[in-house]
Image: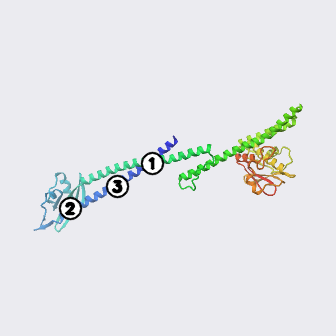
Amino acid sequence: MAVTRFRRRVVALTVLIATAVVAILVVVSHVLLSRVTDADAHDLARTRAEAVAANVTTVGGRVVLTENSSEALDEVAWVYADGRLIDGNVPGSMVERVEALAGSGRSQTATVAHYLLYAQEIPIAGHHVMVIVRVDLTPYETSEQHSLTLSLILGGLAILLAGGVAHLVVRRALRVVHEMAALADDWGHHEPGRRFNLGVPRDEFGELGQTLDRLLERVDNALADERRLTDEIAHELRTPLTVLRGEAQLAQLSGEPVVPEAVLSEVDRLDAAITTLLRAARARTDAGTRCDLHSAARQAIAGRAVEVAFPAKAEVALAPDVAVSLLSPLLENGLRHARSRVWITARIRGEAIVVDVLDDGPGFDPAELDRVFEAGVSGGEGYGLGLPVVRRIAASAGVEVRAIADGRGHVEVTLPAA
């Protein structure tokens, strides 16, 4: 439905533009043709007047026309000498206008009905001589009307043609887009590895193909993330469940009750893993959310031997549980790899607070920095799901986290200041 509306809008816009262009062309052509026909009519009138004037002369002090035996010429050309008609037959409907032109004493034009009247003065000493000629404008007006009608017909056909071509072109273009979108959607569900691979974009369709390739890449990455999440959940939950099962089977075989401490420990471990996963899935930064970094660090440390060096006041724009979920796996990772010391510091940098989690262990291999937060690379037993979940929570909350290879265990987390 949306595609149909878009197609109609494009066709309507094309027809509107074509109509405006045709209207402008018709008006301009009609004005130009009118000027040309007017100029032709005036040229014809001057030519007739000059032809008649060439035959006017004086004989014995009288003004006469030496040659004029044409009755047709008498109907379209008249000669006045000293206010008196000496040649030609003036129609009764034009007598008043012709005599006014003859008595004006200057060359000029006038229009009567469908006729052009042209008066030209003939310089003859001692006499006032005027030649008036008539030109029928009907052929010129008929030509203009025929030209205007033909222009309107051709303009209408051009508008229809433009609308039809626009409809076909847009329909064909949108069909290509529809097919590409359908293919991309199908690949996203069944073959996420497929790509259009159209190369460097040369037109809009190339750009669309490149955009769809990026979209498919994101879909593929999302599916891969979901698979990794499933692996992380299975790996993390299997261990405490195995311990609980072993304790129960041992108690069953020995006939003794299950040791409460072992059960509670593994249940706490399960609860911590599930809580971390839920926080990773729900982590978002809402406007106005803030927490005290000191309090979040104390919850993440949970009585473990970790040194803290924070500014006097450090508030971040994160929910407290999200901040704890970010710091706890990092501290657990540091405690697991440290030789003797783990410490956490914070410093203000612009509108952010940078938290450094450090330990005196071997640190990260510079060649493996890009893979530190991948599942299975630096995971292990302990609280939560380790560094992979840290990356997941950071991405959801808009937080930057990175490992630094400086000869010791060092992970830097950049948190938005409240």
Q: Amino acid at mark 3?
A: Ser
Which label was assigned to residue 166? 1
Residue farthest toward the top in the current orientation of the protein: 255
For disc 3, the neighbor class at 10 Å (few under 14, some 14 to 19, many from 20) is some
Badge 2: residue crowd in 10 Å (few <14, some 14–19, many ≥20): many
Find residue 57 and report its horizontal and vertical position in percent: 14, 67
User: How many numbered marks have been drawn onto this rendered protein structure?
Assistant: 3
Residue 116: percent from the left, percent from the top? 23, 56
Rendering quarter of residue 134: bottom left
- For mark 2, what is the residue? 48
Residue 287, visible in the rendered structure:
no
* Front-lying residue, 349 or 64: 349
Residue extending furthest toward the left: 60
Q: At x 67% / y 45%, what residue is drawn?
A: 222
Q: Earlier in the sequence, mark 2 or mark 1?
A: 2
- At mark 2, the secondary structure is helix
- Color theme of the render: rainbow
Give the Cα distance between marks 2 and 1.
54 Å
- Furthest residue in direction front, as rendered: 253
Residue corresponding to mark 3: 29
Which of the two marks, 1 or 3, is nearer to us in this view? Answer: 1
Tag on residue 30? Answer: none
| Amino acid at dot 2 | Arg
| Residue 32 appears anywhere in the view | yes
Q: Are there few (<14), some (14-19), or many (20+) residues within 10 Å of tag 1?
A: many
Secondary structure of residue under mark 1:
helix
Left or right of 85, for residue 245: right
Q: Are marks 2 and 1 in contact (CB under 8 Å)?
A: no
- Please report whichever mark, 2 or 3, sits nearer to the chain's N-terminal start: 3
* Distance Cα–Cα, label 2 vs label 3: 29 Å
The amino acid at mark 1 is Ala
Q: Position of residue 77 (x, y in %)?
A: 18, 59
